[in-house]
């Protein structure tokens, strides 16, 4: 019985260590889910309370990314469960 307990404890510790190692910054997550062209038109603003805020350089790109918002959320959640929403707004990206 003690061996099973130790095995399960070791397995849980390994899972926790892997989860800690895989924590990525919001900028890295965006690089994984957006194309290079899309990345050239956005700038990470903040990540707070599960909300990822991104500035977009024009209303055209705001519209384009807004159409893909649900798809982006699903893809972001596969990399990090901490992401709950994306807020897009027109702003400076320089």
Image: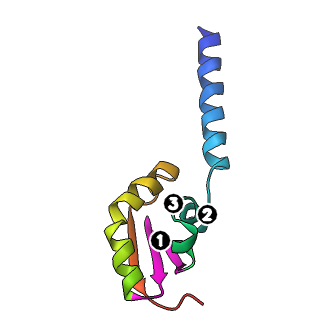
The first of marks 3 and 1 along the sequence is 3
* Residue name at image x 60 percent, y 13 percent: 4
* Residue wearing tag 2: 28
Asked whether residue 52 is drawn in magenta, I would say: yes
What numbered label is drawn on residue 48? 1
Q: Does residue 68 sit above or below 22 in this rendering?
A: below
Q: Do the residues labelled 2 and 3 touch (CB within 8 Å)?
A: no
- Near-viewer residue (48 or 58): 58
Q: Are marks 3 and 1 in contact (CB under 8 Å)?
A: no
* Residue name at image x 66 percent, y 41 percent: 17
| Image quarter (top left, top right, bottom left or bottom right) of the N terminus | top right
**For discs 2 and 3, the disc positioned in front in the rendered view:** 3
- Near-viewer residue (13 or 44): 44
What numbered label is drawn on residue 33? 3
Q: Dot 2 lies on which element?
A: helix
| Image quarter (top left, top right, bottom left or bottom right) of the C terminus | bottom right
> Disc 3 and disc 1: Cα gap in Å?
19 Å
- Near-viewer residue (23 or 49): 23
Tell me which secondary structure the magenta stretch mostly adopts: strand
Q: Dot 3 lies on which element?
A: helix
Magenta stretch in the rendered image: 41-58
* Residue name at image x 60 percent, y 44 percent: 19
């Amino acid at each position: 019985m003690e061996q099973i307990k130790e095995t399960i404890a070791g397995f849980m510790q390994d899972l926790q260590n892997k989860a800690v190692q895989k924590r990525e910054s919001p900028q890295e997550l965006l690089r994984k889910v957006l194309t290079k062209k899309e990345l050239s038109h956005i700038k990470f603003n903040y990540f707070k309370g599960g909300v990822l805020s991104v500035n977009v350089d024009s209303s055209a790109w705001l519209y384009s990314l807004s159409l893909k918002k649900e798809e982006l959320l699903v893809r972001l959640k596969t990399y990090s469960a901490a992401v709950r929403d994306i807020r897009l707004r027109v702003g400076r990206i320089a």
